[in-house]
Amino acid sequence: LWSAVEKLYPDKLFIVPAGDTETDLDLIAGSTGALSNVIVVTASGTDGMKAPSANFGKMSVDVAVPLEGRLVSAPPSTP
């Protein structure tokens, strides 16, 4: 899937969340790996350590952002 995104949309930048199932994304086939137009973001605590449920991966996750104690908005749900 992600390699298709890189080929179909080479001029677009995709910023995607790593997820929150405490999974090593490097072990998942088809993870983003080293794609040039996908940035994968995981959550960290204010101490810089990975948040407890945040997904991780040395090759799959690009950046960690401190989100503990912050209000994160989401689009409204639709019925």
Image: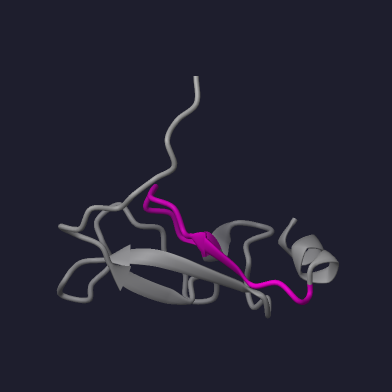
The furthest residue to the right: 8
- Residue 11 magenta-highlighted: yes
User: For residue 54, which quarter of the picture?
Assistant: bottom left
* Dominant secondary-structure state across the stretch colored magenta: loop
Residue 25: image x %, image y %?
52, 61
- Nearest the viewer among 25 and 38 is 38
Based on the displayed image, in which of its 4 quarters is residue 42 positioned?
bottom left
Residue drawn at x 62%, y 72% is 33
The N terminus - image quarter: bottom right
Q: Position of residue 22 (x, y in %)?
A: 37, 53
Residue at screen point 51% across, 68% down:
40
**Part of the protein shown in magenta:** 10-25
Q: Position of residue 7 (x, y in %)?
A: 83, 70
Horizontal arrangement in the rendering, residue 6 relative to residue 23 (left or right): right
How has the structure been colored for display?
A: one colour
Is 13 left, or right, of 54 in this rendering?
right
Residue drawn at (32%, 71%) of the image: 65
Against 63, is 24 above or below? above
Q: How many marks?
A: 0
